Amino acid sequence: MLATALALAAATPAGQCHVYVVVHHVFVRPDGRISHVDVDSVIDPTGPGTPEEVARHRVNVDVPPAYILAVRGFLERRHYSGSPPSFYTYTFFNPARPEAAEPSPAECAAPR
């Protein structure tokens, strides 16, 4: 699934924006609500290699607290009853829009 996301993000037309894939470690309370969200890694999907190789190549990009709050809000739209106590997921990050949790890289260029 991450390989598909990397390929999709890498296909974003040049000049629109630059998106990164942010991998999150999400912690869930016993009641199914999110306890907290940590950034596990940041990946530049435009890196050279196969999607699997790109997924292993982490980059040093600062992810602002406002973005983490936006991601948490995006993830909290769903209830995680019966979920494991933690899981990993990913979102797309556009540094030009640090307060927007992008569910799709195609949306990064859309004016808000």
Image (cartoon, rainbow, N blue to C red):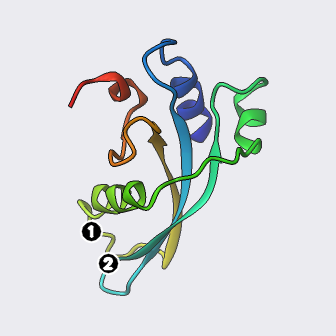
Residue type, numbered disc 1: His
- How many numbered discs sit on the rendered protein? 2
Element under label 2?
loop
On the rendered image, what quadrant is the C terminus found in? top left
Q: Position of residue 109 (x, y in %)?
A: 34, 23
Residue drawn at 33 percent across, 28 percent down: 107
Disc 1/disc 2 C-alpha distance (Å): 6 Å
Q: Position of residue 4 (x, y in %)?
A: 56, 31
> The residue tagged with tag 1: helix, strand or loop?
loop
Type of amino acid under label 2: Gly
The residue indicated by pointer 1 is 79
Residue hosting label 2: 32
| Image-quadrant location for residue 97 | top left
Query: Is 23 above or below relative to 31?
Result: above
36 or 16, nearer to the observer: 16
- Mark 1 near mark 2, Cβ–Cβ under 8 Å? yes
Left/right of residue 66 with respect to residue 24 in the rendered view: left
Query: Which residue, as the protein is rendered here, is positioned at the far bottom?
Result: 30
In the rendering, at what x and y percent does residue 65 appear? 43, 62
**Local crowd size for mark 2, using a 10 Å CA cut-off: few (<14), some (14–19), many (≥20):** some
- Identify the residue at horizontal 63%, vertical 31% (top origin): 45
Q: Quadrant of residue 32?
A: bottom left
Residue placed at 47% from the left, 41% from the top?
93
Q: Measuring 75% from the left and 26% from the top, which residue is drawn there?
A: 50
N-terminal-most mark, 1 or 2: 2
